[in-house]
Image: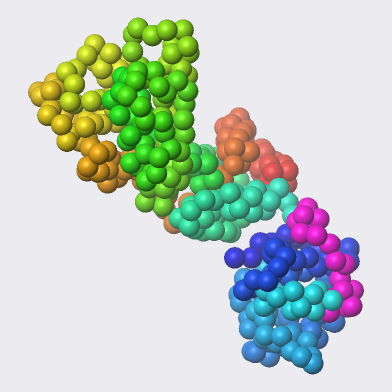
Amino acid sequence: MSLSTNNSPTTHSPTVSVWTPSGRGAVATVRVVGRFGERCNELFRAANRRELSDLPLDRLCFGQWGNDPVEDVVICRDSHESFEVHCHGGHAAVQRIVGDLTQVGCERVDWPTQWSSANGTEREFADALSQATTMRTAAWIVEQTGCLSAAISQLQRFAAAGQRDEIVAMLDGILRWSQFGRHLTQPWSVVLAGRPNVGKSSLINALVGYERSIVFDQPGTTRDVVTAETVFDGWPICLSDTAGQRGSADELESSGIARAREALSVADCPVLVIDVSQPPQADDFQLLQEWPQALIVAHKIDLPNRWLEQLPSQAISVSSLQRTGLSELSNEIVRRLIPELPPSNAVIPLTSRQHQTFWALRESVLAASNRDNLAATLAPFVQSHF
């Protein structure tokens, strides 16, 4: 995917930068931003015989670069004044292409300097893509290419027609996916809580596939929140192991319990773990009553069940020792975190700034009194924020 860094005309000299790490690699990317002119056209001979400046935007074009010797390259123009050269990743090929471009008037800069010419939304898009930790979340970010521009154009048409209700409905549709967009770059938070020794640490170890939490048969072992990151069905998840919850605890343990309750209160998915091999206790019922929306795990089902009919019907039965019920648990966690996916054409705010901008725009549109005010309200937001 190509990233546009400047879609508006510029009077500055074109710049060239290497956008891939130094060293030998399969493919390297060299980027040019600015009015590259006729001499750049002479460096590239497209297989389809079209000149560089005439290539369609956002389309890959194979061809040859330079003379004696020639380099096989793929070029993509992502705006009227920027293009990328994808070439062999070796040092000699990269330096040769950069050298050719500097000889025809491009100024060599590092990639942060070149990227600084991008507008705020473009930088946010690139930053979000760089922070994606799974192919699935990266794919959702990539699919946002062009969606924001299309949405802004539609909002402008609504404003010109004085269609306030349509603008508000569209903004509501965008804001609906803010949480989903935030978690494309930040893992969803899943916090496990329960009485001491119900097996929270063992359960997290089983879910992530390695020993991350401390496992020891002593109440109060976990006195702070211990986290482990994993992936369920392509979605990044942060699992948190918390201090055992019980009514009687010393001062140090009570501090850990307080941190556990705080983590549970802000979790995207709180999980209560009960040990079915032990008779239910008052602390179990207190937690179940206090967190009625939590996902319930009936743990240690490899042992005799001593909860019997008191076991909540919605509890998911799991044995970390025998590794049974883990798939059912991870699937239910995903279902709760992501009950539905955005439609393919949805605009998804990728940052808190974008969310706040759309929210502020919605409030301003509601306060606008007439058709002219709608257009006047929208214009500064588009100019300042997008």
State the residue at coordinates (67%, 53%): 122
Task: Count the marks.
Answer: 0
Q: Is residue 226 left or right of residue 218?
A: right
State the residue at coordinates (28%, 13%): 283
Q: Is residue 368 left or right of residue 39?
A: left
Q: Can residue 325 be seen in the rendering of this structure? A: no
Q: Determine whether 212 is above or below 148 in the image.
A: above
Res 23 quadrant in image: bottom right
Res 219 quadrant in image: top left
The span shown in magenta is: 100-117
State the residue at coordinates (39%, 44%): 210
Quarter the N terminus occupies: bottom right
Q: Determine whether 385 is above or below 43 in the image.
A: above
Q: Position of residue 80 (x, y in %)?
A: 73, 69
Q: Determine whether 200 is above or below 325 in the image.
A: above
State the residue at coordinates (34%, 20%): 218
Please name whichever residue, 324 or 343, is drawn nearer the observer in this view of the structure: 324
Q: Position of residue 10 (x, y in %)?
A: 84, 62
Q: Is residue 359 left or right of residue 70?
A: left
